[in-house]
Image: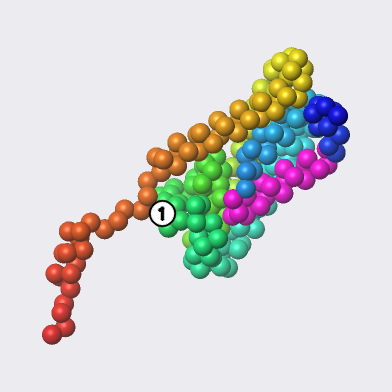
Amino acid sequence: MHLQQWVETIPPLAVYLVVGLVIGIESLGIPLPGEIVLVTAALMSSQGTINPWIVGACAIAGAVIGDSIGYSIGRKGGKPLLDKLGRKFPKHFSPGHIATAELSFERWGMWAVFVGRFVALLRIFAGPLAGVLKMPYWKFLIANALGGIVWAGGTTAVIYNVGVVAEPWIKRFGYFGLAAAVLFGIGSFLFVQRRARAHTPTEPEPSPTEGTAESVAAPTGE
């Protein structure tokens, strides 16, 4: 069976469920490739195998519901939750990443939740961290819903139209062409995320002079 025939046998319902679940779990605070899954599904929808409107709706639902659950868990779990996540996912929840995310929330508030939907690191942090920092839920919900709609709906629309434009090329080379397009998209996202991570400021360490000044200023108790 050719790859194209195999892809066409995948039940649309299964694709919709995978999109909603992966994006929802990622939004919950567990690192998963939600963006890659959404791009792949949107490309499939451009070939008529699934409905792009349902793909976008499932992605939006997963993003909003997952973030809301993450918010609730973070509000109840508090700082110890971040410590536990740091032990399980040290690459994503390191002290430096947490400090950077906290600074973003303190500086931007609701905008950090909205913009965080478009940034890989903040997309994982947004829900739990907003709960830990006790952001009012109505503010979080507004920013969360708007971010989910713009990110999921916009990504689906853009990738769908790219797939429609590339349809003659995909038909010529079959779904190997689609697979190549997906790999190219994955590579592009990884490159952008790596560049963004390289330019992400980390929590500054105290300088030796600061430590010396504190030790000198501290009372000896004698």
Give percent across and percent down for residue 68. Answer: 63, 55
Query: In the image, is 29 to the left or to the right of 206?
Result: right
In this view, 218 is above or below 12: below
Give the class, few, some or many, for how many residues have Cα within 10 Å of label 1's Cα (few <14, many ≥20): some
Please name the residue shown 78% across and 40% down the image: 15
Please name the residue shown 76% across and 29% down the image: 45
Give percent across and percent down for residue 130. Answer: 52, 57
Please name the residue shown 73% across and 40% down the image: 57
Query: In the image, is 36 to the left or to the right of 89?
Result: right
Q: Nearer the viewer, residue 132 or 28?
A: 28
Q: Nearer the viewer, residue 46 or 109?
A: 46
The residue that disc 1 covers is 96
Give percent across and percent down for residue 70. Answer: 61, 57
Secondary structure, magenta segment, majority class = helix
Query: In the image, is 2 to the left or to the right of 100?
Result: right
User: Looking at the rendering, in which quadrant would you find the N terminus?
Assistant: top right
Q: Nearer the viewer, residue 26 or 180?
A: 180
Residue 167 visible at all = no
Query: In the image, is 157 to the left or to the right of 133?
Result: right
Give percent across and percent down for residue 150. Answer: 61, 37
> According to the image, what is the colour scheme of the structure?
rainbow
- Residue 112 magenta: no
Q: Amino acid at mark 1?
A: Gly
Residue 172 appears in which quarter of the rendering? Answer: top right
Q: Which residues are magenta?
A: 12-31
In this view, 113 is above or below 191: below
Residue 23 visible at all = yes
Secondary element at image label 1: helix
- Residue 27 magenta: yes
How many numbered marks, from 0 up?
1
Please name the residue shown 86% across and 34% down the image: 9
In this view, 200 is above or below 73: above
